Image (cartoon, coloured by chain):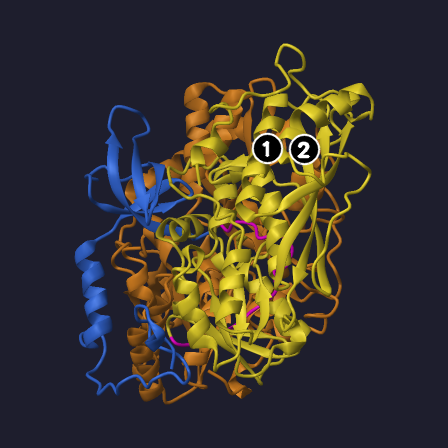
Chain colours: A yellow, B blue, C orange
Amino acid sequence: MDKKAVLDPMAGLSCPIPITEYKKVLLAHGGGGRLTQQMIRKMFLPSFRNEYLEPLHDGAVVPFPGARMAFTTDSYVVNPIFFPGGDIGALAVNGTVNDLAMCGARPLYLSAAFIIEEGFPMEDLWRIVLSMETASRKAGVLMVTGDTKVVDRGKGDKIFVNTSGVGAIDPGIDIHPKRVKIGDRIILSGPIAQHGIAIMSVREGLEFETRIESDTAALHDLVMTMLDASQEIHGLRDPTRGGLASALNEIAEAARIGISISEDRILIGEEVKGACEILGLDPLYVANEGKLVAFVDPDAADRVLAAMRRHPLGKAAAVIGEVVADHTGTVVMKTRIGSRRVVDMLSGEQLPRIC
Amino acid sequence: MCLAIPGKVLEIEDEVRPKMGRVRFGGIQKRVCLEWIPEVKIGDYVIVHVGFAISKMDEEEALKTLELFREVDGALEELKIPEPEDHRGFPRPTEGGTDALR
Amino acid sequence: MRFVDEYREEAPARKYSEHLHAITTRPWTIMEICGGQTHTIVKYGIESLLPEKITLVHGPGCPVCVTPLEMIDKAIAIASRPDVVFTSFGDMLRVPGSSRDLLTVKAEGGDVRMIYSPLDALKIAKQNPDREVVFFAVGFETTAPANAMAVWQAKRLGLKNFSILCSHVRVPPAMEAILSSENRRVQGFLAAGHVCTVMGYEEYIPIAERYRVPIVVTGFEPVDILQGIAMTVQQLEAGRAEVQNQYARSVRREGNVLAQHVLTEVFEPTDRKWRGIGEIPMSGFRLNRAYSEYDAEARFNLTEVQVQESSVCIAGLVLQGLKKPQDCPAFGAACTPEFPLGAPMVSSEGACAAYYHFGRVDLKTQRGA
C-alpha cells in the first residue's frame, strides 16, 4: 500500500474543489442543488469511478452472482477522524467489508452516506474520500451509490459516515453461531488492542511517544484463504467495539456454548501493553479493526492455521482456546499464573483506572 | 489509588523545577516528575503514579524477591515442588508451525 | 515489561499456592485495604489458588467507593457551573450522586474532563485563565503528595483560577476502625504497597502491637499478593504479630521523605466521613491554612446538602469485610454495573463490581481447561 498517498492527499492529487471556491462545507452542499451536484461530480464520482455509479441514479443496479447475498450496514462516528494508521474513511470501508467477510461473503458493492457539519474543511473531506478510494480499491469493492447531507454548525460532530455493503456467499459456506460446536478450536488472527489504543493516544492527548497505529484492514482475502483451506469454519467475528472479550461473549451467548481461552496465547504488542498498563485498561476490552476470531472444526484447525500464517494479515495467528460444554454462555480464561477467571461482557465504557 | 507502574528513566531535566524526566514503560515514553527521587540516574527504574515517581526500584531487592519465588528459601521453608502438569488441550507457548496444535 | 512480567508467572504462583496448602492448619481471615490489590486478586483468581481455610476480605481500599455521597453531589454542583472546567480521574466520573453522575453533567454540556495527572489540571488552568479550573482530589496517601504538588505549584505560579475539591483519606485510621469494631473478624492485613512507598510503614507498628495482628506490606502483582499472604499466614500460624515488608523493591521503612514533605506542606489531617462506614477521626487530609484559598468548597460557597443513600445498598458492610457482595439481595439483580445502587458497584475496584465481573460463575464447581 502506498501509505504516503493516504496520509498526504496532496501527493499528485489536488483537491478538486478549489480552495479559493469553497474552503469549508456549506449547508448548500447538502441541499441537493448545484453545489451538491458539483461535489458529487468533482469529488465523489472521479474517486469511485465505475459504470454502476456513473448514471448517478437514486440506486445502483448491479449484476449479482450466486444464490445468497450478505448485506450489512455500519455507521462511523470515530473521534478523532484522523488517527495514526488511518482515518474515518478507511474505517468505514474496511469495517463494512469485514462485516461481509465475517459472513463468509465476497464483498462486492458499497454505499457511502455522509452527514457533514457545516464548516467542515473541504480539504479534510477530500482526504477522507481519497482514503476511502484507496481502501475500496485494495479491497476490490466498488462504491456504487451514496448520499450527502449537511447539517447546521454545532448539530453534528464534524462528519459521520455510514457505509452499507453487499456480498455474495459461495455455495457450501455456512458461517453462523448455530454451527459452532463443542471442541471447535478458537483462532485469533493477530495481536489485539491496537486500534483502541491508537485512538486513545490521540483523543486524550496523552502525549505518548509511540508507534501505535490502528490495525484497520480489510480481512476478506484472509477469510477466503481460510475457506480455501477448509469450509469447516463455523463462526467468525471481528472484535471491534468492546474488544475480544465482547466478541467471544456474543458468540458464547448466541451459540449457547462455553468458551475456554488461555491468556498466554493471546498476543499483545509491547507498546500496546505498556499503554494499557499506564491507563489501567484491560486489552481484552479494547477495540480492534483488522483482526478476526474464528471457530474451526478441530480436524481442520491445523490446515486453517497454517493457511492464515502464510497470509500477511494472519502471520501471528494462534489458537487461543476452544469451545467447551461447561459454563454455557460464559467465557472463562486460564490466567498467566494458572488460575481461572470469568471474562465478562463489557459494562458501559471502559474508563481508565487510576487505582 | 494505587496504580503505579515501574519504568526506566531515559532522560533527566535537571534545570526545571520541579525536576522532570522521560521514562519508558514497555514501549511507551512519558514525561514524569522526578522531584522526589533526588538521587535518580539515567537507567534507573522508578515507580510512577499519576505522573510522579514515588520511589526508585531497588533492583537488588527485586532480584531477591524473584530469587525467593524461584528457590523458595529464606522467608519460606524448603519444599519439594512437583512439576506443573501439562494443560489438557492446550499447547505450551511455542513458536510456529502445526505442532503448536495438539 | 521489566519488573512487571516476572511477578505474573505461573511457576512461582503455583509454588506459593502449594506452600499455603501445606502450612495452613486453621481458618484465617485476611483483609487488604487497597483497590489495586482487590483488582489483582479478583482478576487473577487468587482465591482459587488458596486453601479453603483462608478467607480474603476486601476492605475500604477503593477511594472512589468511600467518597461520601455529599462530596459527589458537591462535585456535580461545581461541574454544572458554566464558568468551571471540572477535572477528575476517570474512575470518579461514573459514581452516582443523589440524582446524576459527572458523566451526565458532561452529556448535558458541562465541561468535565478526564485527566491522568494533577499536573494536567494545572496545565488546563494555565491555558484557560478566564475559566475556573477545579480538580477532584480523591485518593489515599499515594495520590495526596501529587495533588499537594499541584496546589503548591499553583501558589508558586500565582494561579488564581485553580482549586481542588478535596476528599483524601488515610489508611491507618481505617485499619484501626476495622480492628476496634465489635464484629471484627480480620486477623491479618496486607498493607497497601504504594501507600507505604510514600508513607513508609512506621505507622503500622503500633497498630500491629496494639491489636495483635500481622501486617505485611504487599505489592500488586499476583505473585506479590501470594507471597504477602504466605508471609501473613506464616505469622498467624506461629502466633506472631509483626510488620513485614514483602514489597521491599519499592518500600522503605521511612517511605519517601520528600513526598511526605510536600504533603505536610499543603495538607493537614482532619476528620473524614467514609461512605458506608461513617466518620473516622483524623482519617483524611484537608488543605491547611496556608493553602486554604485553593479549597473549592470555600471558593464556590457550597451549602451542605442532605443526601439519601439507597436503603437496599449494604456497601458499608461490604467495605468493612463483614459481608460479601453475593450476600446482598440486590447484587446482580437491582444493582449491576449498568445500574449501580452504591459505589462498590461502580468502580472497577469496588468489591461488588469486581465480583460481578469476575466471580459470578462458581469456577470451583466447573470442569474444563
Residue depth check, mark 2 versus mark 1: number of the one nearer the observer: 1
Q: Is residue A21 above or below residue C162?
A: above
Secondary structure that dominates the magenta span: loop
- Classify residue A232 by image quadrant: bottom right
Instruction: Pinpoint residue A144: horizontal percent, then vertical percent.
Output: 70, 41
Instruction: Pinpoint residue A327: horizontal percent, then vertical percent.
Output: 59, 81
Name the residue carrying label 1: A128
Segment colored magenta: A338-353
**CB within 8 Å, label 2 to label 1:** yes
Q: Is residue A298 above or below residue A42?
A: below
Name the residue carrying label 2: A159
Q: Nearer the viewer, residue B96 or A329?
A: B96
- A222 falls in the magenta region: no
Q: Residue at x 63, y 75 (%)?
A: C326
Q: Secondary structure at mark 2?
A: strand
Q: Local crowd at mark 1 within 10 Å, few (<14), some, or many (≥20)? A: many
Report whether mark 2 lies on the same chain as mark 1.
Answer: yes
Asked whether residue C19 appears in the rendered view, the answer is yes
> What type is the residue that disc 2 sits on?
Ile
